[in-house]
Image: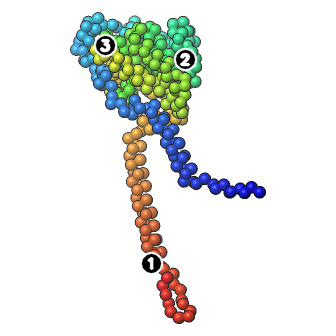
Amino acid sequence: MFGFQAIRPPNPKIIAIIGAVFVATIVIHQVSFLYDFIFAEGLSGPLDVLTTCQQHKPTLKHLDSSQSRKKTTIPNIIHQIWKSSNVSEYSKDPSYRSWKAVYEPRKYTVKLWTDDEIHELIKVKYPSLLPTYESYPHNIQRADMARLVVVHSEGGIYADLDVYPRAVGELQCLQNLGVQAIFGPTVGTTGVSNHFFMAEKGSPFLRWALDEAKRRAGANSNQIVLPYLRVFWSTGPMMVTAAALEYAELQGAANHRLAILDDHYVRKVVGHLGGRSWHGPDGQFLNFVADYHVVIEKIALGLGVLVLFVLAAVMARLVYLKRRQTNRRPLYIDVSQQKLYVH
């Protein structure tokens, strides 16, 4: 007869260790997509950060003087995007009418691009991007690519529907600085945002960014678990920031002609309500943390102190009980000797 040895159940400690290693591996892999943002030291080194627009006293340290003499002007076209021509379906008060009211009397063209018009534009002028555009699982990814496409195609200014005009003179000054593209900031000036930007027609950088978006599509972005992070990395600010840094390094400081608005200065140029209409629960949570990080840090500090206090109290109680148990040793009587012993 064959003897069978009983199979021992797995050690719970080993299971816990394997589980912890597995979770840590996933977390590290996801965090690796945030590397550029986590370890970024700001864009003031490679790019020009504009704190004001002084058309007659250029503050662009990276702009070559020979290029400044042949200044290019960013066209007087304002681009906005929505799924249809009915902007009243937008979740908040759309800024489209505000842009028209302020800038059309100044001979600007304010264009509202619909999904069908953008699809046709990409199909006709950017056929190599069409498969990528159609394959995106999220509408916001298509919107991110679309804004780069329409400004590259015609030049001008892009503004989300929750971005409102403020200082007309400042914006017009920025259009004539002689740079090929200017972007709004995100996370201070750590990154480049795509909710408001302007560029010359056929901007080489916008073409570079579109190619970077295509490279990051598909299997690359599908490795990211959180949809919010997947969008930001594949087509959003993280992608544009990485493309800007790569482009600036390749072109050299005197030739890239890229600039970013200072975090305070951009509020003078435009207002931003931060609609975030596409954000899921993960994005809403991360934005909540970003918006209230100071309060959260104070709460976390207070909870940390409370936890340490509770742990100290528990440890003190355990030490007290241990000593009390040691002092209470059991007694027994040796019947034959009728004597009392302490065990």
| Image location of residue 234, percent across then percent down | 49, 24
According to the picture, the residue beneath numbered tag 3 turns out to be: 255
Can residue 42 be seen in the rendering of this structure? yes
Pointer 3: residues within 10 angstroms few (<14), some, or many (20+)? Answer: some
Q: Which mark is residue 327?
A: 1
Q: Secondary structure at mark 3?
A: loop
Dot 1 amino acid type: Asn
Q: Residues within 10 Å of mark 1 (few under 14, many from 20)?
A: few
Indicate which disc, 2 or 3, sits on the residue closer to the N terminus: 2
Q: Secondary structure at mark 2?
A: helix
Q: Amino acid at mark 2?
A: Thr
Q: Is residue 96 above or below residue 341?
A: above
Is 274 on the left-hand or right-hand side of 56? right
Mark 3 belongs to which amino acid?
A: Asn
Mark earlier in primary sequence (1, 2): 2
Question: Around disc 2, counting alpha carbons within 10 Å, would you say few (fewer than 14), some (14 to 19), or many (20 or more)?
Answer: some
Residue ID at (43%, 68%): 319
Alpha carbons under labels 1 and 2: distance apart: 76 Å
Where residue 13 appears, as percent x and y from the top left, is: 54, 54
Q: State the residue in front, 37 or 10.
A: 10
- Residue at 38 percent of width and 46 percent of height: 298
Secondary element type, mark 1? helix
Kindly report the distance in space between the C-alpha atoms of the residues bearing marks 2 and 3. 30 Å
The residue depicted at 36 percent of the width and 22 percent of the height is 245
- Residue position for label 2: 132
